[in-house]
Amino acid sequence: MWAVSSSLRRSSYSFSFSSHRVTEMGRGFQLSREEFEEIAQRAFDSLPESITHEIDNVHIVVEDYPPEHATRGRDQDKRSLLGLYEGVPLTHRGTWYGASPTPPDKISLYKRNIESVCRSRAEIERRITEVLFHEIGHHFGMSEDEVRAALKDYL
């Protein structure tokens, strides 16, 4: 598990990695877990400080596949979900937020699903950066359209 905490910065975030496996889906380019985790860490580290400085109480995880609840009630195949933000966006946090112990928000990157849509290491690196940026956008309270527009500007 990787974690950073600093009294100089308002942000808090952590990385952890899970070896949860379901079944093999897709036949994309595959990396070792260690390689994938390193790419995810570098993708986060490459984000502008103006973004990472504002991230607050977020746990970032890499899992092989999304859990069943991730697509329940959505018109989306579980295999097409590359990442997911779960939590209270910064724009929805009121004075009540943090008044009692508050569990961290969670950003999940789904390793096997990301690999299944990529044909090279470079493509995996790009996709991880896109998915991470996208889910962080939701942490900031951005809609799907706003995240897509911001991603075009970022990349």
Image (tube, rainbow, N blue to C red):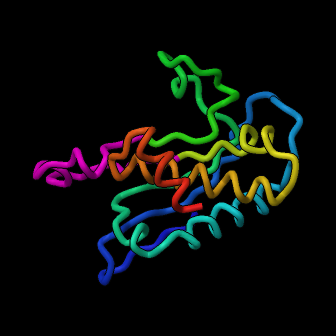
Foreground residue, 26 or 23? 26
Question: Percent position (x, y) of residue 53?
Answer: 37, 72
| Quarter of the figure with residue 132 | bottom right
Quadrant showing the C terminus: bottom right
Foreground residue, 104 or 85? 85
Looking at this view, name the residue that lies furthest to the bottom. Answer: 8
| Quarter of the figure with residue 118 | top right
Look at the image and say whether residue 95 sits in the magenta stretch.
yes
Q: How many marks?
A: 0
Look at the image and say whether residue 40 sits in the magenta stretch.
no
Residue displayed at 61% across by 47% down: 109
Question: Percent position (x, y) of residue 46?
Answer: 58, 72
Looking at this view, name the residue that lies furthest to the left. Answer: 95
Question: Percent position (x, y) of residue 79?
Answer: 70, 28
Residue displayed at 22% across by 44% down: 92
Question: Percent position (x, y) of residue 10?
Answer: 29, 72
**63 horizontally vs 4: left or right:** right
**87 horizontally vs 2: left or right:** left
Is 143 located above or below residue 126 in the figure? Answer: above
Quadrant showing the N terminus: bottom right
Is 7 located above or below residue 105 in the figure? Answer: below
Q: Main secondary structure of the magenta part?
A: loop
Q: Which residues are magenta?
A: 86-107
Residue displayed at 65% across by 61% down: 40
**61 horizontally vs 20: left or right:** left
Residue displayed at 46% across by 73% down: 4
